[in-house]
Amino acid sequence: MKTTPTTFQSAFEEDVYKGLTSFPKYLLSKYIYDEKGDKLFQQIMAMPEYYLTNCELNILKKHKSAIAEIINKKGGFDLIELGAGDGKKTKVLLKELVDKEYDFNYLPIDISQSVLEELENSLKNEIPEINVKIQQGTYFKTLENLADYSNRRKVILVLGSNIGNLLHENAIEFLRNIQEAMTAEDMLFMGFDQKKDPQKILDAYNDATGITEAFNKNLLTRINKELDADFNTDNFIHWETYDPESGTAKSFLVSKENQKVAINKLDLEVSFDAWESIHTEISQKYDDAVVEWLAKEAGLEIQTSFQDNNNYYKNYIFRKKM
Ligand code: AVJ
């Protein structure tokens, strides 16, 4: 029998080892996002089936004036965006804030420095009036240091229903971290994908063109590349489920056959039974009751919310509960 190595060279190595030696097997969805994963996610956001992007864009377009008026107060503010990405949706709001001549700085935070630099450059061209200060880092680290680089009233932006990758207990912890960085005057503006026709959700996470399949399988591709492994991605199928009771969409990779995979850098051989699964991602769907509960657990309360015409998607504004 193999013993667990006591030293790993990275969190990735340790998490892959843990996930593939557990029963049932799992991998963490955050590791999908290497350079290739980032590109595949961009493609997902452009697919017609992936309704989330357009819903949120439409909400911002339709309600930009009302949103801008709510977040502006005397004395100006810092608009801090967690996971800024290409800023396509944010730019709608930024333009509105500039048109209204509000006094604000834009502080986008992202894990990827190159994404941030691209965003900064595109803003220089498209909305040169904005005062931008990019910040590379993870959500948690930057939240801890928020006070160091923002000394004005804070409006924190988290778009894209990114919270949906977190189990409720972790979502509460994430919200609690934000709440602790907030004062009574600060606001949190956040997108939550809503419960809806289960078929609509399944189609968004299992497109016929196979982009989501490639996105999910990028976990295996990345392990092959970085950990010298020999996964044959054709030996796995992408499988999506949605439980309308819990509102949880779950992604799996399912082994089509009995097979062994060598992960040389971990000195590990992983055996798969035919039809054994690897759980890879959750994409949680919400309703008002669940969002209210998450907020309450994190010491926040909902000030107001905005939705699209179909009620597929909602953006909530939270305040710190005093
Ligand atoms: C980036 C977490 C919002 O769960 O909808 C898209 C990631 N996974 N298609 C989501 C994703 C499969 C996405 N988030």
Image (cartoon, rainbow, N blue to C red):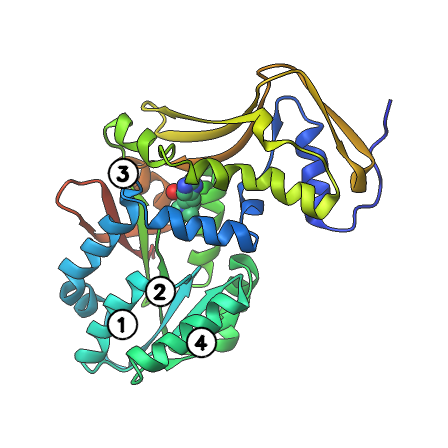
* Residue kind at label 1, given as amino acid type: Leu
Residue occupied by mark 2: 87
Q: Position of residue 27 (x, y in %)?
A: 60, 35
Q: Position of residue 180 (x, y in %)?
A: 46, 59
| Residue at mark 1: C-beta within 8 A of ligand 1 | no
Q: Is residue 298 visible?
A: no
| Residue at mark 3: C-beta within 8 A of ligand 1 | no
Nearer to us of marks 4 and 1 is 1
Circles 2 and 1, Cβ within 8 Å, touching? The answer is yes
Q: Which badge, 4 or 2, comes first in the chain's sequence?
A: 2
Q: Position of residue 278 (x, y in %)?
A: 58, 27
Residue 223's image quarter? top right
| Crowding at mark 2 (Cα within 10 Å: few <14, some 14-19, many 20+) | many
Residue occupied by mark 3: 194
Residue 190's image quarter? bottom left
Residue occupied by mark 4: 150
